[in-house]
Image (spheres, helix red, strand yellow):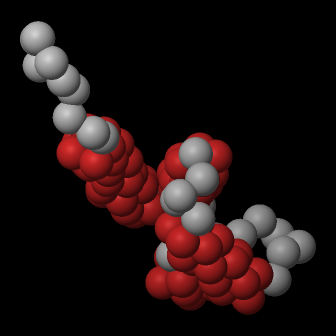
Amino acid sequence: MFLGGLVVYGLRVLPDGIEPWWGIIGGSVLALLMVITAGLLRHSWAIAVGWALQVVVLLGGFLVPALVIVAIIFGGMWAYATIKGASLDARNARRAAPPEPSNGE
């Protein structure tokens, strides 16, 4: 996302009255929030925060249309990671659980 901020800065697509360097600041903050969110995924609310950050990237498509492609690619990877992660957590929980007694024991 830092690179997306550089694109916003370089193309000077922010509205009049907003300095172009705010694009770099916004991209840097967004990238930092994404890294922090990835570290907090042990909490269930962090998945929703990750989706909200993906929506912010998608909304960046109003400034730079190429960010829509970035949002689709990384949003798809985020979706896969959350779905696959949940299935792996369920599988690991089943393996860690004590075995169920069979009939007659």
What residue is rendered at 15% in x and 18% in y?
105
The correct choice, above or below, for 16 with respect to 11 in the image is above
Of 15 and 88, nearer the camera is: 88
Q: Position of residue 41 (x, y in %)?
A: 52, 59
Of 1 and 18, nearer the camera is: 1
Of 52 and 64, nearer the camera is: 52
Which image quadrant for residue 65? bottom left
Q: Position of residue 70 (x, y in %)?
A: 37, 62
Of 15 and 3, nearer the camera is: 3
What residue is rendered at 88% in x and 73% in y?
17
Q: Position of residue 49 (x, y in %)?
A: 63, 51
Q: Residue placed farthest to the right in the image?
A: 17
How many numbered tags mark residues here?
A: 0
Question: Image check: 18 left or right of 10?
Answer: right
Which image quadrant for residue 30? bottom right
The correct choice, above or below, for 76 with respect to 38 in the image is above
Residue 52 appears in the figure: no
The correct choice, above or below, for 44 with respect to 10 in the image is above
Question: Image check: 17 left or right of 31?
Answer: right
What residue is rendered at 37% in x and 53% in y?
78
